Image (cartoon, rainbow, N blue to C red):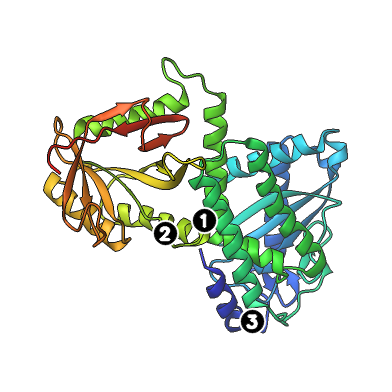
């Protein structure tokens, strides 16, 4: 899939002087293509239990109904359906048809002259993009003639909005949001953004380009997959352990195996936005080193201890296991990450039965660069001056004087 930058850059280069000759004779759709398209549309209507009496028209849209096609352009066939004739519950029907569209793509591989056919049921009242070429396959005539002109695109506005929405999706996943109403809200916001912009400005409208860019970067699938996972967890019944305990158990398991570390990428002198970006980059660095994905926790320490305004201050931390990496190499890797993110220290446990230790990774006074301070063994359910919170469960490593 192309990125937004590639899409914009290539648009002016791929605009053609004629419609795709594979499917068109001038501006007339080839008869064998038209008949094949109608045959596919009827089959799809039957497969989705849409009565043909509710299908008012069948349209060809997208790249192959325009001068902006290329060798990767699909044949986009839309059934124009009066959904009121199918079901009284519009929202349920929309969900059903979206699910059927995904199932069709999974089960079928239909092509016309080697070009993939993408088919969808569209409501008769759905807004039609103002500048999009649209051909009635059923009536064999143009509804909207395609244009060779490419509208001006506000690149900076698109990039900025994509960055903000991508960050919002990343934050939701990083924060492990499990409120399905909030998740549905952002999903609806994304789809409404596209739908409104298509009706007002067509394919090159700001909202549609933002949506396409997010989709091409994988953020729409990322959000959908996360929402499915959240729904599955919310519906599941766990034996012995609830979700919070299960998360803590994973951390305890990593501790018992040895080859475990806890570190953060965040710094007190950075803004919240900068710290989120640093945490996201640390996730990538961990996987880039060949290590398993980290368990997200909140590292906490006591600020203003013993004073009236004493409080717990938290920062996003990562529990990292060595996986298949050797223990010595793992320790070296964790130290290098601590140094990269200018952390005072990282907590490192190399041996199965040994104590964990704070290892200094910058030149701060505590514990000092390359200095080690034993912190003892893991104590689930305990809190202290320094502790860690995973979901709603806490644990700490008790400090000892030995080995300082």
Q: Is residue 47 above or below residue 10?
A: above
User: Are there few (<14), some (14-19), or many (20+) residues within 10 Å of tag 3?
Assistant: some
Residue sitting at x 43%, y 47%: 316
Q: Residue 245 location, x and y as percent? A: 41, 24
- Closer mark to the observer between disc 1 and disc 2: 2
Residue sitting at x 59%, y 76%: 8
Q: Which residue is mark 1?
A: 218
From the viewer's perspective, tell me whether residue 98 is left or right of residue 218. Answer: right
Of the image marks 2 and 3, the number of the one nearer the N terminus: 3
Q: Secondary structure at mark 3?
A: loop
Q: Secondary structure at mark 1?
A: loop
Residue sitting at x 26%, y 49%: 346
The image quadrant that residue 386 belongs to is top left
Q: Which residue is mark 2?
A: 278
| Figure disc tally | 3
Q: Residue 303 location, x and y as percent? A: 43, 45
Q: CB of mark 1 within 8 Å of CB of mark 3? A: no
Tell which of 143 and 90 is nearer to you. 90
Q: Is residue 40 above or below residue 177?
A: below
Q: CA distance from mark 1 to mark 3?
A: 29 Å
Pick the quarter of the image with the C terminus.
top left
The image quadrant that residue 155 belongs to is bottom right
Q: CA distance from mark 2 to mark 3?
A: 44 Å
Q: Is residue 168 above or below residue 106?
A: below
Tell which of 137 and 352 is nearer to you. 352
Q: Residue 68 location, x and y as percent? A: 64, 75
User: Are there few (<14), some (14-19), or many (20+) residues within 10 Å of tag 2?
Assistant: some
Q: Which residue is mark 3?
A: 16
Q: Residue 205 location, x and y as percent? A: 73, 70
Residue sitting at x 83%, y 34%: 87
Of the image marks 1 and 3, the number of the one nearer the N terminus: 3
Q: CA distance from mark 1 to mark 2?
A: 21 Å
């Amino acid at each position: 899939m192309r990125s937004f930058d590639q899409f914009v850059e290539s648009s002016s280069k791929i605009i053609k002087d004629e419609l795709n000759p594979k499917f068109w004779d001038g501006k007339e759709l080839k008869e064998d293509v038209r008949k094949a398209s109608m045959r596919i549309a009827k089959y799809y209507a039957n497969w989705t239990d849409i009565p043909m009496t509710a299908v008012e028209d069948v349209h060809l849209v997208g790249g192959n109904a325009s001068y902006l096609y290329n060798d990767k352009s699909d044949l986009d066939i839309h059934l124009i359906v009066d959904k009121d004739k199918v079901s009284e519950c519009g929202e349920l029907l929309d969900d059903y048809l979206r699910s059927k569209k995904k199932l069709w793509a999974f089960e079928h591989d239909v092509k016309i002259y080697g070009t993939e056919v993408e088919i969808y049921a569209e409501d008769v009242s759905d807004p039609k993009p103002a500048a999009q070429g649209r051909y009635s396959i059923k009536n064999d005539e143009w509804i909207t003639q395609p244009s060779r002109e490419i509208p001006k695109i506000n690149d900076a506005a698109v990039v900025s909005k994509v960055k903000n929405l991508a960050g919002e999706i990343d934050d939701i996943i990083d924060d492990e949001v499990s409120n399905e109403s909030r998740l549905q809200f952002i999903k609806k916001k994304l789809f409404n953004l596209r739908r409104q912009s298509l009706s007002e400005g067509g394919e090159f409208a700001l909202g549609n380009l933002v949506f396409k860019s997010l989709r091409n970067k994988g953020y729409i699938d990322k959000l959908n997959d996360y929402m499915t996972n959240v729904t599955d967890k919310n519906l599941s019944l766990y034996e012995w352990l609830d979700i919070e305990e299960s998360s803590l158990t994973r951390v305890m398991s990593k501790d018992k195996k040895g080859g475990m570390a806890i570190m953060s990428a965040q710094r007190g002198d950075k803004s919240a936005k900068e710290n989120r970006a640093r945490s996201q980059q640390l996730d990538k660095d961990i996987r880039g080193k060949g290590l398993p994905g980290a368990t997200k926790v909140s590292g906490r320490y006591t600020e203003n201890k013993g004073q009236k305004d004493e409080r717990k201050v938290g920062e996003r931390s990562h529990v990292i296991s060595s996986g298949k990496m050797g223990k010595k190499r793992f320790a070296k890797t964790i130290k290098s990450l601590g140094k990269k993110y200018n952390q005072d220290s990282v907590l490192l446990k190399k041996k199965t039965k040994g104590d964990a230790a704070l290892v200094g990774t910058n030149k701060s006074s505590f514990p000092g660069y390359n200095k080690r301070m034993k912190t003892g063994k893991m104590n689930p359910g305990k809190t202290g001056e320094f502790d860690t919170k995973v979901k709603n469960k806490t644990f700490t490593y008790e400090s000892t004087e030995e080995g300082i």
